[in-house]
């Protein structure tokens, strides 16, 4: 079996370790290298909770691209690092699968243009949990019949941004179906500012931050005499792995940037 060679950037990070473990445990993938600013010199197998692999973490992505010839880069680093890593990879003919969030519109445009020019595929997904993608898809479907909707997203207390990208993506998908709508009582009075959450064109978004949570979301629809709740829970970072592996297996067939997993599942 021909194995796809993968380099992981952010290999010492919370998600990166899960990714490394998955790559090492997957028959059709081969770990070509592991890059991080932290944990340099450590064996990546041990960092990922497996046996010694003889592959040490390095900060030299270009060295790995030149000597190990990976086909796919999986990046779970930081908003500051992801563009440089991805541009370097594409210039070496390597297809990026990007989970790192925070790329700006200009940066996304840059990647679109470079991939088009080099005829290299890339997958950039703000949420690799397949259940979360299905939640958004089902929410869009439900909005045809239930235009009144509120979104509650719940995350661990270390999360920096609110609302989550997934909540915004869900609101966007619902808006494509039902458009803007003023919900609730037109004379509604917020006695404490923020009590009704944030709003995206009439859809109320509520963000909960608590220790013990990972990543969760409820989409609540209300109709005549009935409600419908669609809920997704990421219970651990393993939830991202099937989506990442799916993207790794498809990205080499692409010749452009795909945003989100929706078109791949
Ligand atoms: P994390 O634990 O902080 O890991 C990121 C790692 O990348 C850190 O070890 C960091 O080192 C390292 N790094 C920084 N710059 C680098 C560079 N130039 N080259 C190589 N490594 C570099 O973060 P995380 O929780 O794993 O999350 C990583 C990213 O994935 C975040 O953007 C997060 O929002 C995103 N995420 C996406 C999904 C999804 O489904 N798409 C799911 C979860 C998380 P330093 O600490 O020294 O900077």
Image: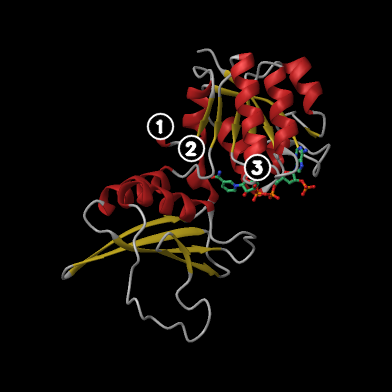
Q: Classify mark 2: helix, strand or loop.
A: loop
Q: Nearer the viewer, mark 3 or mark 2?
A: 3
Q: Where does residue 19 sit, x and y in percent of width and height?
A: 59, 38
User: Mark 3 highlights which residue?
Assistant: 104
User: Mark 2 highlights which residue?
Assistant: 260
On the rendered structure, is 228 left or right of 110?
A: left
Q: Are marks 1 and 2 in contact (CB under 8 Å)?
A: yes
Q: Is mark 3 within 8 Å of ligand 1?
A: no
Image point (67%, 19%), residue name: 70
Q: Name, please, the residue furthest toward the bottom.
A: 191
Q: Is residue 136 visible?
A: yes
Residue 263, labelled with which disc?
Answer: 1
Q: Classify mark 1: helix, strand or loop.
A: helix
Compute the Cα span from label 1 to label 3. Answer: 21 Å
Q: Classify mark 3: helix, strand or loop.
A: loop
Image point (53%, 17%), residue name: 255
Q: Vertically, is 161 above or below 190?
A: above
Compute the Cα span from label 1 to label 2. Answer: 7 Å
Of residue 150 and residue 177, the one placed in the foreground of this image is 177
Q: Quadrant of residue 5?
A: top right
Q: Vertically, is 211 above or below 191?
A: above
Q: Is mark 2 within 8 Å of ligand 1?
A: no
On the rendered structure, is 256 left or right of 53?
A: left
Q: Where does residue 49 sit, x and y in percent of width and height?
A: 65, 44
């Amino acid at each position: 079996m021909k194995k796809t060679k993968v380099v992981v950037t952010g290999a010492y990070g919370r998600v990166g370790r899960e990714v490394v473990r998955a790559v090492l445990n997957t028959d059709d993938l081969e770990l070509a290298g592991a890059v991080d600013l932290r944990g340099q010199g450590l064996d990546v197998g041990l960092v990922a909770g497996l046996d010694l692999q003889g592959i040490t973490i390095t900060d030299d992505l270009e060295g790995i691209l030149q000597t190990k010839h990976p086909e796919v880069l999986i990046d779970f680093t930081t908003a500051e690092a992801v563009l440089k890593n991805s541009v370097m990879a594409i210039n070496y003919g390597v297809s990026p699968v990007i989970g790192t969030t925070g790329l700006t519109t200009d940066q996304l445009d840059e990647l679109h243009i470079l991939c088009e020019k080099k005829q290299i595929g890339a997958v950039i997904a703000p949420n690799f949990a397949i259940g979360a993608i299905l939640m958004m898809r089902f929410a869009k479907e439900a909005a045809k019949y239930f235009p009144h909707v509120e979104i509650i997203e719940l995350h661990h207390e270390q999360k920096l941004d609110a609302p989550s990208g997934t909540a915004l993506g869900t609101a966007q998908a619902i808006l494509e179906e039902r458009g803007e709508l003023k919900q609730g009582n037109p004379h509604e009075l917020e006695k404490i500012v923020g009590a009704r959450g944030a709003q995206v064109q009439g859809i109320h978004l509520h963000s909960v931050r608590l220790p013990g949570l990972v990543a969760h979301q409820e989409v609540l629809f209300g109709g005549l005499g009935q409600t419908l709740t669609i809920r997704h829970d990421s219970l651990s970072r393993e939830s991202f792995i099937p989506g990442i592996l799916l993207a790794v297996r498809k990205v080499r067939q692409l010749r452009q940037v795909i945003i989100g997993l929706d078109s791949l599942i």
